[in-house]
Amino acid sequence: MDILNIIAAVLSIGFGVIGWLMPKYTLEVLNLAGHTDTMGMSEIRASGGALFVGMGLGAMILGTPTAYAMLGLCWLGASVGRLTSIALDGATRKKLGFVAVELAVAVTVLAINL
């Protein structure tokens, strides 16, 4: 089960690095390409990037089931936000793909650590 925890942490770090260091690319993937003002870039670097890096690194550094469970809860929180968007703003193929990944990571990590 430790390997699944490490995979979830590395996945978090990987997605985070992309958001943190490649914000224009991230904005394009999220269909937000027009939001390249300094606050938009800052928000992507912070909430869509470095936050995920910190979550993944924190879980790996602490290395406890509780730390990995918190990582899973963060992914679950992201999926709740995405599901809210699907319900209130409409479903798209991209949103459904993202929520599938978020739920898969969350459920897997929570199942093995709680």
Image: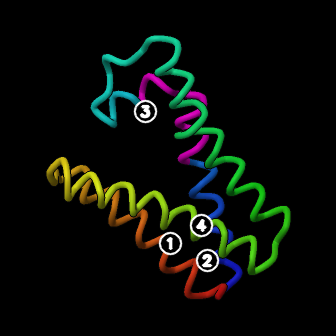
The image quadrant that residue 33 belongs to is: top left
Which circle marks residue 26 in the picture?
3
- Residue labelled with disc 1: 106
Marks 1 and 4 sit apart, C-alpha to C-alpha, by 9 Å
N-terminal label among 1 and 2: 2
Q: Residue furthest right?
A: 62
Query: Which SS class for mark 2?
Result: helix
Q: Residues within 10 Å of mark 2 (few under 14, many from 20)?
A: some
Above or below, 70 relative to 58: below
Which amino acid type is shown beneath numbered disc 1? Ala
Instruction: Give the x, y percent position of residue 113.
Output: 66, 85
Which circle marks residue 8 in the picture?
4
- Residue labelled with disc 2: 4
Q: Residues within 10 Å of mark 4 (few under 14, many from 20)?
A: many
Which amino acid type is shown beneath numbered disc 3? Thr
Asked whether the residues under the numbered discs 4 and 2 touch, taking CB atoms below 8 Å apart as contact, a structural biologist would say yes
